[in-house]
Amino acid sequence: MLPTPPHEQRPGNAQGRSVLSVSDLNREVKQLLEGNVPLLWVGGEISNFAAPSSGHWYFTLKDARAQVRCAMFRGRNRSVRFTPTNGREVIARARVSLYEGRGEFQLIIEHLEEAGLGALMRQLDALKAKLQHEGLFELARKKPLPYLPATIGIITSPTGAAIRDMIHVLGRRYPAARIELIPVAVQGQGAAQQIANAISLAGRLQRHDLLIVGRGGGSLEDLWAFNEEVVARALANCPIPTISAVGHETDNTVADLVADVRAPTPSAAAELASANAAALLEEITSTEIRLQRAMQLQLRHLDQQVKLVSNRIRHPREQLQNRAQRLDHLEIQLRALIRQYMTTGRQRVQHAERTIAQAHPAHRIAQHKQQLIQTRDRLQKAAARLLQHKREQTAHSAQLLHSVSPLAVLERGYAIVSNDNNQVIRRAQDTQSGQKIRARLAEGEIQAIVE
């Protein structure tokens, strides 16, 4: 519902009701539309187009079932790249509004473009951004053109004017080149795939030194096959240098950006691919003249060198004497070296003989025998000392053992008394009358009965 602002009482409003004026109503509706409907795209056909001196545009946008009034102000319509005419299909970006003066629903146009062309341009811009992000437009990846290509492949329509222009230019400028036409469709359904397949095939066969891909001029729709991604990929992956020659100088396609070289026209592509025969002949003539002058200069220089060398050449007899003297000197040095070498050899042989003699088994056996005799003597002396020490230890231990032995006590007249169970009897009360006992003496044993 519309807000109900306070308004003055109108004549005939006896009951005090608030009544909107027409201008208030239109203003409220306009604010409601502009505040609640976002910026949107609308497509339709232009009719009733008017462009007064103020610079603003007014027209109706319609389709088969409805129409809406539109206004595009001077500040916005300056960026439109075409002249609107009645019956043209367009796409408009607009704000929904209301013209208060007549209470008419209308669109305020912010941007206007042709319907088919606009969609294609957006698609083209998106593809260019994608390929540029991948680096397919970079100059670093572009291959240089061969100076004198032996075989030139041309991928284009066999019936168009472009092939005739290129053959004419190549025949005039560079008749030595071999030209091979790879026929393809250059517009319409499937044309892009044919062009891409031809480029890929030429790249695999490697029969050409240079490829020219192109066609004559036309509308954006006519040239669209050269804006397809499949053609751009084929050009980017082609190992052969490529020239793109699509349309006129003002036409720019994706193929132009990806190819190694862009030519503004097919004829210009043929000029880029060929060397001018007249210019080549002139260059060959100029090179021949420079070569003759250089040869003459070189011959004069060599002649001077021959004369200079001939003046310094000595008689062969003098050279032979010098060589003989050199041989004698070398012979003396050789004899001295031989004597030195033989002396050194004898010294090395004598040293080897001494080393061998020291390492002879008899010498080493004698050394080991002497070592064995010395070791045996030391071992015998050590064994005698150890045996004597052990005898003394044994005698001393025997003496200590005898001093504490019970037998020593028995030799002093004592006896060891035990019962039948060999238990030693130490007290008289441990015996009974008539009990058999034994008394061990120092020599022998006595059996007795207790009374």
Image (tube, rainbow, N blue to C red):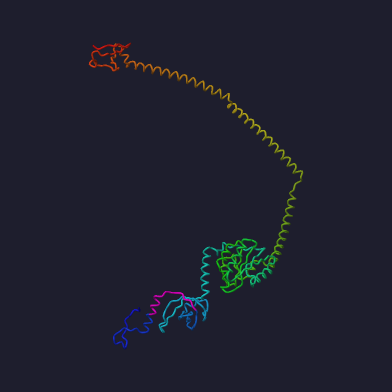
- Viewer-closest of 382 and 237: 237
Return the residue found at the far left.
429
- Viewer-closest of 306 and 258: 258
Judge whether 370 appears above or below 410 on screen. Answer: below
Residue lying at 61% horizontally and 72% vertically, measured from the top left: 216
Where residue 342 sits, quadrant-wise, is top right
Number of numbered discs on residues: 0
Residue 114: x and y, percent?
51, 76
Residue 267: x and y, percent?
64, 70
Residue 10: x and y, percent?
32, 87
Quadrant (top left/top right/bottom left/bottom right) for the N terminus: bottom left
Where residue 139 sits, quadrant-wise, is bottom right
Tell me if residue 31 is in the magenta stretch.
yes
Residue 205: x and y, percent?
63, 61
Where residue 317 sits, quadrant-wise, is top right
Quadrant (top left/top right/bottom left/bottom right) for the C terminus: top left
Judge whether 342 appears above or below 209 on screen. Answer: above
Say if residue 433 shows up in the picture.
Answer: yes
Return the residue found at the far bottom.
12
Q: Is residue 301 left or right of residue 394?
A: right
- Viewer-closest of 447 and 72: 447
Tell me if residue 343 is in the magenta stretch.
no
> Which contiguous range is marked in magenta?
29-44
Q: Is residue 396 left or right of residue 370?
A: left
Say if residue 49 shows up in the picture.
Answer: no
- Viewer-closest of 427 and 387: 427
